[in-house]
Amino acid sequence: MKTMSSQNSQNKQSSAAYIKAENVSKQFSSNGSVLSVLENISLDVKAGEILAIVGRSGSGKTTLLNIISSLEKTTTGEISAHGSVGYVPQKDLLLPWRTLIGNILLPAEIQKRNLKTSVIKARDLLQKNGLAQFEKSYPSEISGGMRQKVSLMRTLVQDSDIVLFDEPFSAIDFDARLQLVKEIRSYIVSAQKVAIFVTHNIEEAIAISDKLVVFSERPAKIVYQTDINIHDEYRDPVNVRKSKDFQELFERIWKLMSKQI
Ligand SMILES: Nc1ncnc2c1ncn2[C@@H]1O[C@H](COP(=O)(O)OP(=O)(O)OP(=O)(O)O)[C@@H](O)[C@H]1O
Ligand SMILES: [Mg+2]
């Protein structure tokens, strides 16, 4: 079961956003067979916090984000997501017949929000990410990494209370990633958003998050969880290696993930 309170809180500025999952399990049934994907997942993320999820391919990370964003239902257990939800999906899902700016503005158009404000935000993001000259290009005319950045911008322009990131930087080059980790973290913390960030990159997960969970192989259970307390100056995937306790934490997570090979 899933409860969504105050879906339209963008306009209401109600109480702080959060996500809370209690004993969430998920099974898919097809052709008479049952696939268990999530088993007793409990977690909570508060305003101003980023939860990172790492886990092997096929463990159920995207499935959990789909449940939080109401694309899927839980089989048992409960999820409460308080606040409007924005989702950066694993595939960029840009519409080929719309220009880049047209894609970025799509959610604002659907929700009939003030387009002028969204256009200003969209142009600012395109500029900051070196894509201003491609504003009127179509997705087929740009690279995979550029498309992934546009998909990220499309979600950030919505300014949702909750933001779900599903491997948002997987196609983006290393330099841009370093910058994006810092920028996204500073946006979520300063605007008191709630975020879940799925990645296969352990350094990236540690650098960006306040809390980190490791999923086991399918059916995913939480096999490790920890708070991440790192000074702001170390919060990118290169400098994070210099932070206290990094090595120990990295090895612990790495062992948990490689044990399952
Ligand atoms: N709609 C669905 N119907 C049936 N099975 C599904 C469905 N969605 C996902 N699955 C299965 O659930 C399992 C978990 O998939 P999911 O996409 O959540 O994994 P993931 O952890 O995100 O993997 P990756 O790191 O490769 O993105 C997979 O075995 C997948 O085939
Ligand atoms: Mg996935």
Image (cartoon, grey):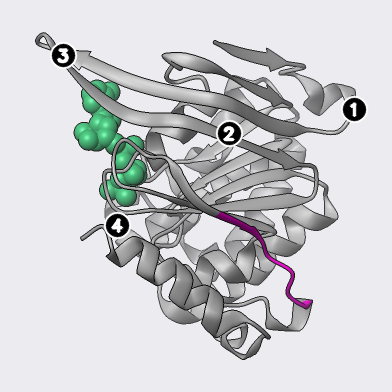
**The quarter of the displayed image where residue 119 is located:** top right
Separation (CA) of disc 4 from disc 2: 42 Å
Rendering quadrant holding ligand 1? top left
Image position, residue 38 (x, y; %):
38, 31
Name of the residue lying farthest toward the bottom: 242
Residue at the (63%, 58%) spot, across then down? 226
Q: Is residue 84 above or below residue 231?
A: above
Image position, residue 105 (x, y; %):
58, 37
For label 3, the residue is 30
For label 2, the residue is 42
Image depth: mark 2 or mark 3 in front: 2
Q: Assess mark 3: CB under 8 A from ligand 1?
A: yes
**Range shown magenta:** 225-231
Image position, residue 171 (x, y; %):
35, 64
Residue at the (29%, 66%) spot, across then down? 258
Amino acid type at image mark 3: Ser
Amino acid type at image mark 2: Ser
Examine the rendering and report whether any part of residue 91 can be seen.
Answer: no
